[in-house]
Amino acid sequence: MAEPYLAIDKRIKLLKTIKSRLIENEQALVAATSKDFGYRTEFDTVLGDLLPTVKSLTDTIKRLPKWSRNESRSVGISLWPSSAHIHYQPKGVVGVIAPWNYPIQLALVPALSALAAGNRVMLKLSEFTPHTNAVIKQIMDSDVAEHCIIVEGEADTAASFCDLPFAHLLFTGSTSVGRKVMQAASKNLTPVTLELGGKSPVVILDDMNIKEAAKTLLFGKLNNAGQICVAPDYVFVPQKLEHQLVLQLSELYKKHFKQGVEGKNLTSIVSDRQYQRLIATLNDAKDKGAQVFEPIEGHQVDELKHRMGLHILTQVNDDMRVMQEEIFGPLLPIMSYESLQQVIDTINADSSPLALYLFGHDKEKISKLSSSIRSGTLAINDVLMQVTADQLPFGGIGESGMGHYHGIEGFKTFSHARNTLVSGKFNPRTGLLLKQNKLLIKLLKWMYLRR
């Protein structure tokens, strides 16, 4: 191949082309995602899907020349007079498997990071978002297509995709499927980045303004109808504040979503399968003793349109599916607590979450919680927004994922950091080493083997 990978200026030109096409196709993407979901608000598509993608592109275009520079490293006196640096090389062909819940952002941000690093990309789009896929294919067509190939298909296509000998493979989706992806990739020794999920807990401290916490939680739980890998999954609240939290969530919901599932500000559940899963999870909790609060009685579910409003659950326990599985919908379990250690022990008994949310202002308690609980990301007095910070890496830990992307971490994930040692014309070291010079050996032993 005459040009094994694009020079930096050509990569920037390519990224600018894609950015321009994304902006031009804003309304087409809004309409397409709404068709795929049955109904999706413009807010959820623009603010949650399109804007983060364009922001990431803008930041990458600005910073790529700096990211791609060689990094000088010290060689120490033992390798004098040579110099050393790290050179970031493209890995080759990168595979990206995208999910359905954010079909623009979670498809394009990793793919564009891989392109920025100089790779070619094969992008497997979700079979559940055909209308969005059609617009993305138009955006990535013509001159972009030689650098990024779009793949569509059902589960068998995805399985075959994972078997390909990629230089790197990134998958976003469930932990159960992530295990299969990693197993398939291992046959080719393909390195993987897995962006999974899990149950992201919220901990409210006793010094927190409950109304403010409720506002933030309501936004996080109803954005995209809760179909987000970092959505608040369940809440710990001091026992004395539990009733107040339920009341504030209910009042705020009635104020901002007063028409319930008949309103135009609530995104639908993406498919009948996902809707029925949520109904089954809710019924399982009811059957096992959970108390369910529906802020607007009679307007909380619509089976025909796959729509579901907020359901607040109290008196939940570990036997319920709602406390065993990632919810991925507008069900919000609330658990009261008496001690922080109880909270820490309960969260740590499960696998490490993708996100941890802490609400309060007591620095000592926040420090204790953040240092005692491992999580992929952490947000204090906020939800979801940590993912949109372009200069912060995003990724899970343990069963919530492995590896990072976003910002410079995305560039480095899809690059090979090549160790480079440069020796010039004057290099007495090799002659001394060849002769096994005793004085040199004594000097090195004195320098490095002293106690």
Image (cartoon, rainbow, N blue to C red):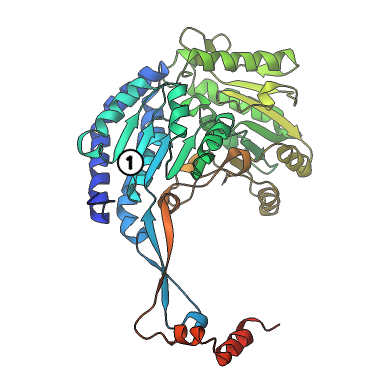
- Image: 73 above or below 442: above
Task: Give the residue at the far left of this rendering.
Answer: 142
Q: Residue at x 46, y 40 (%)?
A: 170
Q: Residue at x 40, y 29 (%)?
A: 103
* Quadrant of the image occupied by residue 176: top right
- Quarter of the image for the C terminus: give it: bottom right
Callout 1 secondary element: helix
Q: Is residue 68 visible?
A: yes
Q: In this rendered view, identify the residue nearer to me: 257 or 174.
A: 174
Q: Residue at x 42, y 26 (%)?
A: 126
Q: Is residue 196 visible?
A: no
Task: Give the residue at the far bottom of this rendering.
Answer: 439
Residue, disc 1: 54
Q: In this rendered view, identify the residue nearer to me: 268 or 258.
A: 268
- Image: 451 above or below 356: below
* Quadrant of the image occupied by residue 166: top left
Say which amino acid is labelled 1.
Val
Rendered location of residue 155, percent (x, y): 47, 22
Horizontal side, residue 184 vs residue 54: left or right:
right
Q: In this rendered view, identify the residue nearer to me: 234 or 397.
A: 397
The 10 Å Cα crowd at callout 1, few under 14, some 14 to 19, many 20 or more, is many
